[in-house]
C-alpha cells in the first residue's frame, strides 16, 4: 500500500508520511537496516525540517551501526549529542547518546 502511494503522489506531505511509515516498518518490524538507511536518509534531508527530524537522525545512526558502518554512526551520534548537550532540558538525552557512542 505504502509503496503504491509513494509512486502515485507528488504531494510533499504524503511523501514525508510514506517515507516515515516505510522507514518505521523497515527499522522496527523487518529489521531491514539497509532499507531504513535509505528511508531515513531521505527524511533527514527533507526540507522543511520535519518535526521528527531528531528521531530520523537517531534511527539513521542506529541503522548505520547495525550494518557495521560505525564511522558514519559515530558522526551522527556525536552531532546529536552536541546538539542536545547545549539544551539543559535534554541533558539526559545527550548523556545517553554519549554512552552509546563511547561503546562504539
Image (spheres, rainbow, N blue to C red):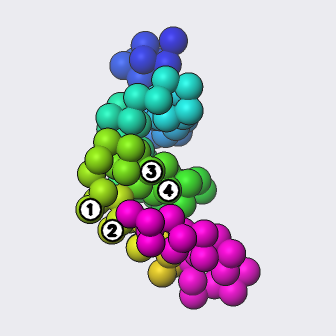
Q: Disc 4 marks which residue? A: 58
Q: Is residue 56 at least partly visible in the picture? A: yes
Q: Residue at x 54, y 70 (%)?
A: 99
How far is disc 4 from disc 2 in space, using C-alphas?
Answer: 11 Å
Q: Is residue 41 at least partly visible in the picture? A: no
Q: Nearer the viewer, mark 3 or mark 4?
A: 3
Mark 4 and mark 1 in contact? Answer it, CB < 8 Å: no
How far is disc 3 from disc 4 in space, using C-alphas?
Answer: 6 Å
Mark 3 and mark 4 in contact? Answer it, CB < 8 Å: yes
Mark 3 and mark 1 in contact? Answer it, CB < 8 Å: no
How far is disc 3 from disc 1 in space, using C-alphas?
Answer: 12 Å
* Other-residue count near label 4 (Cα within 10 Å), few / some / many at <14 / 14–19 / ≥20: some
Q: Quadrant of residue 63?
A: top left
Residue 89 is situated, as x and y percent measured from the top left of the image, at 73, 80
Q: Quadrant of residue 17?
A: top right
How far is disc 3 from disc 2 in space, using C-alphas?
Answer: 11 Å
Q: Quadrant of residue 74?
A: bottom left
Q: Earlier in the sequence, mark 3 or mark 1?
A: 3
Residue range corresponding to the magenta coloring: 84-104
Q: Disc 2 marks which residue? A: 75
User: Which of the numbered marks, if any, corresponds to residue 71?
Assistant: 1
Q: Earlier in the sequence, mark 4 or mark 2?
A: 4
Does residue 3 lie above or below 68 as drawn? above
Disc 3 is placed on an element classified as helix
- Position of 66 with respect to 17 (left or right) is left
Residue 94 is situated, as x and y percent measured from the top left of the image, at 59, 75
Mark 2 and mark 1 in contact? Answer it, CB < 8 Å: yes
Amino acid at each position: 500500500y505504502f509503496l503504491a502511494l509513494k509512486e502515485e503522489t507528488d504531494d510533499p506531505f504524503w511523501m514525508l508520511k510514506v517515507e516515515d511509515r516505510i522507514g518505521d516498518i523497515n527499522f522496527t518490524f523487518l529489521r531491514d537496516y539497509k532499507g531504513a538507511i535509505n528511508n531515513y536518509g531521505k527524511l533527514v534531508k527533507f526540507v522543511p525540517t520535519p518535526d521528527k527530524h531528531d528521531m530520523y537522525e537517531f534511527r539513521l545512526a542506529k541503522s548505520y551501526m547495525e550494518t557495521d558502518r560505525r564511522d558514519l554512526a559515530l558522526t551522527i551520534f556525536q552531532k546529536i549529542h552536541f546538539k542536545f548537550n547545549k539544551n539543559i532540558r535534554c541533558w539526559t538525552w545527550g548523556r545517553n547518546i554519549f554512552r552509546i557512542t563511547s561503546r562504539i
